[in-house]
Amino acid sequence: MTRTTTTTRRALLAGAAAAALALTLTACGSDPMPGMDHGAAPSATGSPAGHDMPGMSHGPDGMAGMPGTGHGADGLAAEQGGYRLDGALAGSEYRFTVTGPDGKVLTDYQPEQTKEMHFYAIRSDLSGFQHLHPVRGADGAWTAPLAALQPGEWRMYASFVPGAGSGRGTGLVLSRTATVAGQAVAVPLPAAAASTTVDGYTVAVAGTPKAGAAGELTVTVSKDGKPVTDLQPYLETYAHLTAFHAGDQAFAHLHPEDPATAGAGGGPSLSFHAELPQAGDWRLFLQFQTGGTLHTAALTLNVAG
């Protein structure tokens, strides 16, 4: 091989390597390290965080989603895919709007688990969980009536599926923070446990999900040592399971694998698809209904890396 040929080949190889590196950097972007704080805003109208979590997939419309869930990112951003959440506390209510890519307030939604909007409020220490289905006015503004909020920083999440715009049919979770005035006293996160009790019911959770990997959690409900088989349908299933990551309040909705059957009671065991993007402690909130009463059980789950 001549010296000229060798030089040319080296130049071509160097160019190919540079191109590959450029493509890699473009794909990776500037996402933060796992477990980093996403810069929560100091008020309900603060700046959006807007970072993707490791292990997330991006659909053809460029909107990020947690694998297997269809929900936008980790719920810590106020804006994503052109959709923006704006809101503020007004006494015991949180009033908010969602603006679409066209700059107009969104008034067209697709129901998800029977509701156009799922609204969550949780304190920064993962206490005080509330899950509501707010009322939307004709102008597109939503009003979520909240139970009393303890002083401190809260995060408000709006989970919805746009019925119009470039994100039509894509599940999104957007959030903002709000501060409740007063002397804030932190509530320690309960240690990880396999079971908890609420309203006389014992709820046990089995499964060992790993961060970023698809897995399964099995929830078993009993009362007075006997299996519960009279769970009533709630949001098209026999239980609703939501999780929040300790430290940054990342959001995850764990989807039930079996829908509720009309005219039949559910239980005692329920299976959920679990895909939690980060290692560490997650606070789980399981909601189930019996005798027309909704119960909310909470426990801490440790997810291995």
Image (cartoon, rainbow, N blue to C red):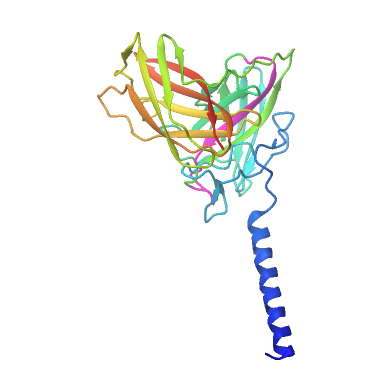
Looking at the picture, does residue 185 appear above or below residue 64? above
Looking at the picture, does residue 257 appear above or below residue 16? above
Left or right of 28, for residue 257: left
User: Which quadrant of the structure image shows residue 141?
Assistant: top right
Image coordinates for residue 125, horizontal then vertical, percent = 64, 21
User: Which quadrant of the structure image shows residue 35?
Assistant: top right
Image coordinates for residue 197, horizontal then vertical, percent = 45, 13
Looking at the picture, does residue 147 appear above or below residue 113? above
- Asked whether residue 164 is drawn in magenta, I would say yes
Residue at 69% x, 39% y: name it. 48
Image coordinates for residue 42, horizontal then vertical, percent = 74, 29
Query: Which stretch appears magenta?
Result: 149-168
Image coordinates for residue 77, horizontal then vertical, percent = 64, 39
Left or right of 201, for residue 89: right
Q: In which quarter of the image is the C terminus?
A: top right
The answer to whether residue 87 shows anywhere in this view is no
Q: Nearer the viewer, residue 111 or 33?
A: 33
Q: Quadrant of the N terminus?
A: bottom right
- Asked whether residue 103 is drawn in magenta, I would say no
Residue most toward the left? 263
Q: Nearer the viewer, residue 81 or 275?
A: 275
Residue at 50% x, 32% y: name it. 117
Residue most toward the bottom? 2
The answer to whether residue 154 shows anywhere in this view is yes
Marker count (numbered):
0
